[in-house]
Image: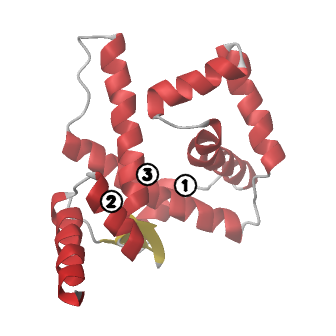
């Protein structure tokens, strides 16, 4: 029995790390065993989160294609690289915000989200847009988009010389996944 479990875990891990597989079985096993996509400055980036964000970006580009049939988005490899870079930069951003004692409260997120609602006309329209475009709830949108946006805005305001790209280049990045 133990051998079967090891074979399943090994196969799923290989599929995840070398093929960047996004099938439900591989992602579920990767999640259960805590398979990392990589590390940034010692901070763990999970394979499950990587695949979840990749799916959201793919949803975004598929939505764009539905809106404009002439639209051609980036390749899967470009999307994978972009998702990895964004997740890694978010780790660096969170570290820098912590060092500067900059936080984002739930009230801050709600105020920023109110701007999105106003722009889209209603909370229902905002929720629909996030679901149709990314496959996200409003809470996921707040966490994945608005929190990093507000952190970077506040870091830049507190330190006009703050440069996320420069901080990222100084970071220690180790990708487990093969992109």
Percent position of residue 31, x then y: 40, 67
- The answer to which of 177 and 92 lies nearer the viewer is 177
As drawn, the residue found furthest toward the bottom would be 2
Comparing labels 1 and 2, the label whose residue is closer to the camera:
2
Residue 30 tag number: none
Secondary element at image label 2? helix
Residue on which the image places disc 2: 27
Percent position of residue 113, x then y: 72, 33
Q: CA distance from mark 3 to mark 2?
A: 20 Å
Percent position of residue 6, x then y: 22, 83
Residue on which the image places disc 3: 86
Percent position of residue 134, x then y: 46, 33
Which corner quadrant of the image does residue 59 belong to? top left
Residue on which the image places disc 1: 163
Residue at 23%, 22% (x, y): give it: 72
Secondary element at image label 3? helix
Comparing labels 3 and 2, the label whose residue is closer to the camera:
2
Which corner quadrant of the image does residue 102 belong to? bottom right
* Crowd tier of the residue under label 2, counting other residues whose Cα lies within 10 Å: few below 14, some 14–19, many 20 or above: many
Residue at 76%, 58% (x, y): give it: 103
Which comes sooner in the sequence, label 3 or label 2?
2
Secondary element at image label 1? loop
Which image quarter is the N terminus in?
Answer: bottom left
Residue at 24%, 88% (x, y): give it: 2
Residue at 25%, 66% (x, y): give it: 177
Which comes sooner in the sequence, label 1 or label 2?
2
Is 43 situated left or right of 145 in this image? left
Q: CA distance from mark 1 to mark 3?
A: 15 Å
């Amino acid at each position: 029995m133990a051998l079967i479990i090891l074979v399943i875990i090994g196969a799923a891990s290989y599929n995840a790390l070398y093929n960047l597989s996004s099938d439900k079985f591989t992602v579920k096993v990767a999640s259960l065993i805590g398979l990392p996509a990589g590390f940034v400055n010692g901070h763990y980036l999970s394979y499950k989160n990587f695949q979840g964000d990749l799916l959201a970006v793919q949803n975004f580009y598929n939505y764009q294609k539905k809106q404009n049939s002439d639209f051609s988005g980036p390749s899967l490899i470009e999307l994978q690289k972009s998702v990895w870079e964004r997740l890694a930069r978010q780790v660096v951003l969170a570290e820098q915000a912590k060092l500067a004692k900059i936080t984002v409260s739930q009230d801050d997120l709600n105020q920023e989200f109110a701007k999105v609602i106003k722009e889209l006309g209603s909370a229902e329209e905002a929720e629909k847009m996030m679901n149709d475009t990314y496959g996200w709830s409003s809470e996921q949108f707040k966490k994945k988009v608005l929190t990093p946006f507000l952190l970077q805005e506040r870091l830049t305001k507190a330190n006009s010389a703050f440069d996320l790209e420069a901080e990222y280049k100084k970071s220690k990045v180790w990708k487990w996944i093969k992109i």
